[in-house]
Amino acid sequence: QQQQQQHVPALDVALQLESSGKWPDQYEAIQQVKTAFYVRIAELAQSELGLEARPTRVFVDVVSRGFVFRLSIHVDRELHLLRQEETRLQARQLHLQRQHDRTTSGGGHGGEPSGGTAMLTGVDPEATAAETASVTTALAQLAAKIDAVELAFPRRIKHTGRLHALQMRHPAFSLTARLFKRWLAAHMFSEVVRDEGAELLVAAVFLSPPPFATPQDPTVGFARVLRLVAHHDWLKDPLVVDFDGSLNAQDLAAIQKAFRDTREQLPAMFIATPDDTTTSRWTAHAPTPRMLARIMAYARASEQRLVAALTPCAVPTTTAAITTSAAAPLFDPLACTAVFYTSLAEYDAVLHLKGEAVPNHHHRLANDGDGDGD
C-alpha cells in the first residue's frame, strides 16, 4: 500500500547578503541574479549536505529533519530601485496632469476654449489621457509591489525580531500563538487573519495583561486572547501593542485621535505598534467588518467553553476568575479540544474527502479510524 503523502508547511527564512556594488541597477535583473543564487544554493545543499532542495524563481526550499525551510534573498537595493521608479512615474503623472490642464483651461480671451492650444503645442489630448491612465495603472501596480516587498522583508524581519525578544521574556508566548493560530484554522479564519496579525493579538495579552497577571501557561494565555478578540471595542478603540514600551502617554493620545479622525478609512481590526501607528499594515485588507463580527462571535463562544474546561471544580463565569499565573492549572484536556471544532451546518454544500487523499489528515483532533476526512 502506497504511503500517504503528508503536507509539511514551509518555514520562511530571509537571507540578507553583504552589501555589494556588483548587484545590477535594474530591479528585474536583480531577480534574475537571485534566481541564480537559488539554483546554486540547491546544488550545494544536495552535493555538500545531502539535503533535498528545490529551487524556484523566487525562493528555494530545503528539507532538513522533516522540516521545509523556504529561503528567499533580500537585497536592500530592490526597495531603492522600486521607490526610484515610483518617483519617476509620479513626476510623469504630474507633468501629464499639468499638460492636460493647460490644454483644457482655455487659451484665448474671455475664457475661450483652447482647442487651438493643442495644435500650437503639438499635444494630442487623447494621447495625453491614454498615457495618464497608463501611468496611473503602473503607479498602482508599483505601490502594491513596494508594499509586498516591505511586508515580506524589512517589516517582517523586524516583526520576527520583536516576537523573538518577547518569547525570551515570556516562554508561554509561542505555544499560546500556536494554539490561537490552530483555533483560527479550525474555524476557517486562517485566510482572514494573517499570521502576523494573530501574533500581534497574542502579544497584546502578554504586554498588556491587566487586570490579569501575565499568563504563564499557554492555555490560560489562549483564553485571554479569545477574550481580547471577543470583547475589545474594535469600532471605537485601536489595539496598541507596545513591544518595547517606547510609546508614552502623548503618543497613545495621538494614536487614539488619529484613529477617531480617520476611522472610516481604517481596517476593521486596527492594531497599532511603535513602527506602525496609522495604517495597521498586517490587518489592512482583512478581516472585513462582517468577518470580524463572525470571528468575535466564535471567540466569545470558545472563551466561555474554554474557561469552563479550565476549572472543572469551580467553574467561573468569566475569564476574570482566571487570575492565577500558576504554571499548571487544573483543566480537562478533552473538554478543551471542543473549542477547536466548528459547525458545518451553515454551509450549503460540504464535500467529504477520503482520509488518504488529504495530506494533512494526521492533524485531525479526532480519529474515528474510518479513514475518512471531515
Image: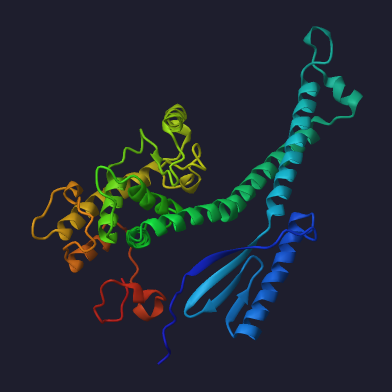
Give the residue drawn at x 41%, y 84%.
4
Residue 5 in view, yes or no:
yes
Find the residue positioned furthest to the bottom: 1
Find the residue positioned furthest to the left: 313
Find the residue positioned furthest to the front: 169
Image coordinates of residue 139 in percent, x first then y, are 68, 42
Find the residue positioned furthest to the top: 110
Q: Quadrant of the N terminus?
A: bottom left
Q: Is residue 296 above or below residue 216?
A: above
Give the residue drawn at x 16%, y 63%.
330
Q: How many marks?
A: 0
- Picture quadrant of residue 109: top right
Between 188 and 53, the residue placed more toward the observer is 53
Left or right of residue 316: residue 55:
right
Left or right of residue 117: residue 23:
left
Between 102 and 175, the residue placed more toward the observer is 175
Image coordinates of residue 47 in percent, x first then y, are 65, 85
Residue 344 in view, yes or no:
no
Q: Is residue 252 above or below residue 205?
A: above
Image coordinates of residue 174 in percent, x first then y, are 38, 61
Image coordinates of residue 369 in percent, x first then y, are 25, 82
- Picture quadrant of residue 313: bottom left
